[in-house]
Amino acid sequence: MNEIKFYPSNKAEALAYLYMEKQDLTDKSPEDVVDMYNEVYDRMVRKMNAIPTGKPKMGY
């Protein structure tokens, strides 16, 4: 199987992608994987927006 190269456009995408790489997706449908990724991505964005950094928050 060919490996797909993925270039995240922000920190939340990168972290969600890394998290999903480590999950066992054996019995997951494509729809399940999309739902899982979206949930993880949303959690990453909420967490990063909750941490005061002095930088502007991500607008997602």
Image: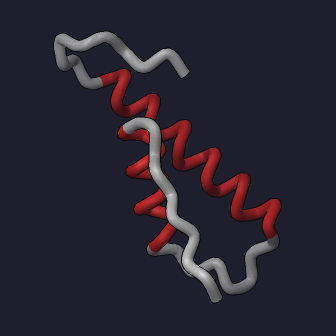
Q: Can residue 44 be seen in this view?
A: no
Q: Position of residue 17 (x, y in %)?
A: 48, 57
Q: Residue at x 57, y 69 (%)?
A: 4
Look at the image and tell me in which quarter the N terminus lies.
bottom right
Q: Which residue is drawn at 74% across and 83% down?
A: 27
Image position of 8 with respect to 29: above or below: above
Question: Can you name the residue that lies furthest to the left here?
Answer: 54
- Give the side of residue 51 with respect to residue 47, left or right: left
Q: Which residue is drawn at 52% across and 74% down?
A: 23
Q: Position of residue 53 (x, y in %)?
A: 18, 19
- Give the side of residue 43 with respect to residue 2, left or right: left
Q: How is the image coloured?
A: secondary structure
Q: Position of residue 2 (x, y in %)?
A: 61, 82
Q: Which of 22 and 14 is in front in this view?
A: 14
- Give the side of residue 55 with respect to residue 19, left or right: left
Q: Can residue 46 be seen in this view?
A: yes
Q: Residue at x 34, y 30 (%)?
A: 48
Look at the image and tell me in which quarter the C terminus lies.
top right
Q: Quadrant of residue 42?
A: top right
Number of callouts: 0
Image position of 12 with respect to 32: above or below: above
Q: Nearer the viewer, residue 40 or 13?
A: 13
Q: In which quarter of the image is residue 47?
A: top left
Image position of 59 with respect to 44: above or below: above
Image position of 26 with respect to 16: above or below: below
